Structures are given as C-alpha cells and as structure tokens.
Amino acid sequence: MKYEHCIRCTICVENCPVFRVNPEFPGPKQSGPDAQRFRSDRERAEDGWVLLCSQCKRCEMACPCGVEPAQIILNEQQRYGKEHPQTPAHLLFANNYYLSALGSLTAPIANMIASSKMGKKAFRAMGISTYIPFPKFHFRTMRREKKILNRKTRKVAFFYGCFINFYRPDIGRKIVRLLSALNVDVVLPPQWCCGLPALGNGNIALAKHFAQKNASSLSNYIDAGYDIVYTCTSCGLCLMHDYPGILKIPQGKKIAESSYDVHEYIIKLINEGYAKPVFGEVPRKIAYHIPCHLRALEIGYPAAKLMAAIPGLECEILDDACCGLSGSYGFKKENELTAIQMGNRAVSLIKKTKAENIVADCGSCRMQLSGLSGMTALDPAEILCEALDIKDQK
Amino acid sequence: MSVTEYDVVIIGAGVAGLTAGALLAERGFKVALVTQGEPTACLSTGCIDVCSRGSSPLSGIHDLPPEHPYHLVSEKIIRDALNYFQAAMTDMGIPYAGGAEENRFILSALGTLKTSCLVPSTMKEAPQDTKDSVHIITFKGLKDFYPGYIISRRRNTKSSVYDAGVYSTMSIASHFEEKEFFEKFIIWLEKLNIDEDKLAFPAVLGLESASEIVDTVSILIGKPVFEIPTIPPSMPGRRLFNGLKGYFHKKGGTLYWAWPVAGIEKTGKVIEAVTTPSEGRPNSINAKAFILSTGSFVGGGLTATRESIIENVFHLPVHISGPRETWFDSDYFSLNHGIGRAGIIADSTLRPAGSSWENIFVCGGILADTEILKNGCGHGLALATAHAAALSCAEYLSR
C-alpha cells in the first residue's frame, strides 16, 4: 500500500461521488491514506465510516501519484467486518449468490413477494432499501442453458455473472449468440458468484471461498485453450484485480492474463482479422454511461469503440458520474439517500443529452438509472445485436 | 477499426494533452490519451495565464528571453490556440472572457489582483482596480477560504457568512445545483440588502452549471457577481478539466485511465508502443506518433534525484543549467529558482532536440526554460505548444 505517496492534493476527494452528497463520509483522502498512518493490526478497527465507501474506485483512477485509496479502504472494510457484528443487510448481500439461486428456483413466487407491499416492508425492516424495484428473478437462468460446442478455432468460456444469470439471462443468451455469430465457440463453465459482493460487505472469507471455486473451474478451461470472457465490469474487475490482489488466489495471475471484457474480445477478434462484422444502421441517439468499474479496468471504453462503427448511432459518452447503486451498496437503507442523490446527478447529466436510451455495461448501473429516470437502459451487446440483426431466440 | 492501433498516443491529460488530442481527433486521426491520474490543471485557478509580464500578453511574450519555448510558436498559432480554446469551452458550456490583446485581473483569495488573460466567465466581473466596493459572501465552516485576508487589503470590503449546512467546497458546489437550496439561499441574500458595488463568492457556485448560476444570482440581486478561486479542491480547475475532457471525447478521442507508462517498444528511430504494468496481460498501445505532455515535477513528467533530473516516460535528455547547487535560490519565495528552467528542449517542430526519436512531440509544462511562475504563462504556453505540436504531428502522420 502506497499511502506514503499521497501529496494531499485532494483530487481524489473531488472525484468521490459519496463525499459529494454524504457529509458523514470524510472522503477517500481521510479514510484512505490519512487514516492509514494511524491504523495498526494490533488495534481494533474503529472507523465505522469506511463502510460508507461504495468502492467505485474513482479515487484510484484520479490519483496522480498512484496511491490507491479505495484499496486501502477495502482492506479496512474487511478488518472492520471481521471485528464487528454484521447487520442483516450486509449478511444477506454478501450471500447474494445463494439467495438469488433460491429466488430463481422459485421465480414466480419470489418475484411476487419481492414486489408486494408486505415484501417491501419486510425488506425495509431488514435494512434493505426499496426506492427502485428489486430486479425480477428468472427461472431459466444461464446455468440451465445447454452447452454449445461447434468446434471452432476460437473458444471462450463465458463468465456471465450473477446479475445476468438470475435477473437478465436474456442478455446472457444474446451475448452467446453475438459471439457465435463472430464464429467463436462459447461454453458456460461451472461458476459461482465472483466474490465481489462478499468483499463489498466486509466478508473476505466468503469472497475467498467463491474465488477459489471459480478459479479452479476457470483455470481448467484456460489450460484447455479457452479464453475467459466476462460481461459484468464488476465481476471483471474482481477477476482481474482482486483475485491476484487482495484475495491472493494462486491461479489469479493466470486468470487475469486470459480474461477479456466481451467488447474488448470482439475488438481483439477484429484486429486479428478473425472476425469481420458488418454493422447495419441503428439510427438513434444513446447516452453511454461508463460504469466506474469499466474505467477501473484500465482497458479504455471498448464498447464505445465498437458502437462508433455502427452507422447512424450517435453515442454520447458520460464518464463523470457514478450511478450510485454500486451493486448492493445502494440497497442498504443507510446508503439509500446517498445512492439516490448520486443517481439523480447521473440522470440529470443523461437527460441533458436528450438521448433516447441509456446504455451501460453494468447491470446494476442500468437498474439504478432506468429506475430513477424512467428511460430504457440497454447493454451495449444489445445494441451490437441490433446492428448485426441477431434476433432473440425463444 | 482497431483499439490497440492508434495514429497518436498522447501521454498526459492536462491542458496541453487534451488540446492536442482534440485537435488531432478533429482532423480524423485515431487518438488515444493515457494518463496516470487527473492533471494538475484540476488544482489550478482555471484561468489561462498567457504571459503576465505586462499589460499585453503578446508583447510580454516578445520580451521573453530567446530560449523561452514560446518563441518556437508563431504569433498566429498563439492567437489560434486561444480562439480555439475559447470556442471549445463555450461549446462545453464553460465560456471564458478575455482575449490575446490584453491581460486582465482576477481577485485572489489573499486580496491581491492577479494578472491573467482568459478567465472563466464567473470571474470576469472581478474588480480591475482598488476602487470598487465588494461584498464577500462566505460559508460557515468552509476551511479553504478566509475573507479576512481580502478585507485587510481592500477598503470598502465587507463580508457575510451563510450556513449551507455542509462545509466542504465540493458539497457546497453541488448544493448550488439544487433548486431548493438555491432558492433558500437567494432569499437570505435578498434580505442582506447589499450596498456594495459588487458581490463576490469563493469559487463554489456549482460544478456543471457555474456560469448560469453566477448569471442568475447577478440578475436576481441586480449587481455584478464574481468568483474568487480557492486553494484545492478548486472548482474552476475542475470545470476547466471537465470541459477539455468532454471536448476531447466529443471529437472522438479515447481515454485510458490509471495508465502510467512504464515501458516503451521501439525499432530504430521510431517508438512503436507504450506499455503499462498490469495484473493480467501486458497492456500496450501501439501508435505511429506520440505526444509527451506529462507536465513538470508536480504533474509527474520529471523526477529529480540527488544527481540528476529524469524524464519519466522516454528518458529524454533533460536540460538543467549547472550542478545541483545552482538549482535553487537562497530566498524561498524567489521566482528565480534554477529548477524552474528544467525540462526538455524542443526544436521548431516540437520534437525533443538532441534525441534520435523522430515520432515524439513535446508540449506543455515539460518544456525547458518555461519559468512558468516567473512569467505567468502556464496554461497559455500549454495551449500554444499543444497547437504547434499537433500541427507538426499531423504533418508527420500525413507524410
């Protein structure tokens, strides 16, 4: 941890979306490098306010000196989580994978309960916020998808992530068809939650448990010549940075070397001359909200690059605002107001563009932005499918 | 179409880098900009100082010593650069007042008049002499601004304190963009019945729509309103960065965050790619040309060791006059510290002189002999040399 490199310029504070709206949070400089000088493993973790950080990593992107405030705070969140009793909301969201698996199995009933008045009351009693509708569970998850094996030269193992699997398997299926249309063989390897929700709720032991299971599954596929492709930018960030980093997964480096964002991968195929997609016209204006974790992946904005090649599509890039939901962060009652204020700012910037649709790579960004704006929010892959005329399969 | 193959890679996201990037993207080149973090422009007052050594920036430039990098750029390019900047920022909703013919003053947080050239429209009403009486509004608990400094220097100056309920520059600025807060504030302001000629604020009047907020307050109160730049976090500096970044995106440039350049790939006299450390695959970006706009010491372009000064990306030869003893003046506040002259010497094509690379162009604060503090020429020099470097680079690419 390079907290000594901090020159106290406050650029991170200016970039912190939480600090901007929540006076309770002292900001990344104070909770990160400043406070770190006074922390010791021999003392109890007492800074409860570190939990107010949403881990958007904007401070790390902005820091001109290479200090990683979010990483320092993440470590402290784990230490705090270990030493203090967890609230029901923290426990539930850390275990989101198991809950969602249950929700999907009982999809119609679970959805009914989640959207009923009683259900919402129960959520609030447990400290879960209900200002935007809880996403709908789907029975036909990605895990239930048949494996597609056509023996093409390029093969990828698709890490679809919990959001796609339990709530939007339709987008997952679209991405599989999109890659197949580019002559790529797609398989769906056995996979679990990436571990980020557990990490975000201060439960590093559970995060490690998930990460180890995923790592041994994915590394099998890598050894068999598969590239790993992810679509959720937060899962991706966890695979690329947290597996080799804070979680210290032995296969972490190998996984980080072979994992690609789906759009980054498509561009790689095009660059290598393997695929030559011809995009049809999509005459529309979209506001492309850049998820914080896409910025943090340090790969530029690959979907924007692809969408720029679609005739008729006008794409305005918005990378200044965090949507505020940050996975399970905004679903916790204590963060509700912060998340709404952050989200409203992002929405007001989107509305200024007068775009027809919102586009974002991250499922939870889409959920928040469409919930607060009433606009439709799409995955970039949906736009690409439209441009390539790839239809939904029933 | 490609993401790893660019025409130009620009290193550094400051005023120079973003301007050069927008200019090249506008000409149809594929441009990527890589940066370790946000630039020192965010910490600045947001004003464009062109040359503060007199009342006219252009004649000030004329009088600079012959080795000053301004002399690499023609007067026409300097004018074009300033016009281009003003048009771009107006386009992004952050208009700038002033022009190349004459310098103007802004009121500093210490109560002095600071010379600048192009100033954000929120500062254009700043008093140009000591005559105007000023009423300063400040905010309860705001640690970064003390009107007492100004009152002690200027006669006819008063101040009032408003309790915004929040105490940091950022939070107050974001509250000003909320209608409810704004209306409550205006009613409080109207009740003050201000007699003074002008109304001043620390620069916290919004982030995205500051110029509109200043105009609205001015209309509602019926007096000229202006902002006084504060120490970082500096809202006008951030507006400047956001405006240039937005314009760069608009012209089609691609930005890579958290991308400190750690290595280069080269063949013969040509740099082929820059690389960054990464947990995963080696992260490299190829291009036909590279523009170095990493700034000076604070910006991260140069590092001083006990023995020498190093240029961090390409290890270009750094010019510094004399041994370490001559780098500093004995007076701390002197403007003649030799270290202010350290940097890269460029030739008339903005290529680094005395190096064999043919596809590197240099602009902005990393240039040698700028003495930015002494000459008051930071952002202005960045704009002018960015233009010259972009033109030279475009010529190289179209060969």
Image (cartoon, coloured by chain):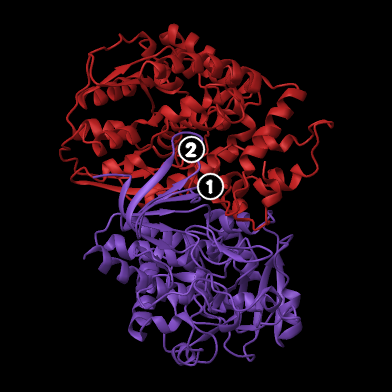
Say the numbered circle drawn on residue A293. Answer: 2
Label 2 CA crowd tier, 10 Å (few <14, some 14–19, many 20+): many
Question: Residue at image x 41%, y 17%?
Answer: A223
- Residue sitting farthest toward the top: A106
- Residue B278 point in image, percent of width and height: 50, 39
Q: What amino acid is labelled 1 in the image? A: Met
A316 over A200 or under it: above or below: below
- Residue sitting farthest toward the right: A42
- Residue A283 point in image, percent of width and height: 19, 43
Quarter of the image with the C terminus of chain A is top left
Q: Hue of chain B?
A: purple
Q: How many marks?
A: 2
Chain letter matching colour red: A
Quarter of the image with the N terminus of chain A is top right
Mark 1 highlights which residue? Answer: A61
Kindly identify which chain the residue marked by label 1 belongs to: A
- Residue A273 point in image, percent of width and height: 21, 36
Q: Determine if residue A116 is in view.
A: no
- Residue A212 point in image, percent of width and height: 55, 16
Distance CA(mark 1)–CA(mark 2): 10 Å
Q: Are marks 1 and 2 in contact (CB under 8 Å)?
A: no
Which image quadrant for residue B392?
Answer: bottom left
Kindly identify which chain the residue marked by label 2 belongs to: A
Say the numbered circle drawn on residue B334. Answer: none
Question: Residue at image x 68%, y 68%?
Answer: B138
B78 over A279 or under it: above or below: below
With B152 as the anchor, is A167 left or right in this view? left
Of residue B243 and residue B134, the one placed in the foreground of this image is: B243
Question: Residue at image x 46%, y 45%?
Answer: A346
With B142 as the anchor, is A232 left or right in this view? left
Q: What amino acid is labelled 2 in the image? A: His
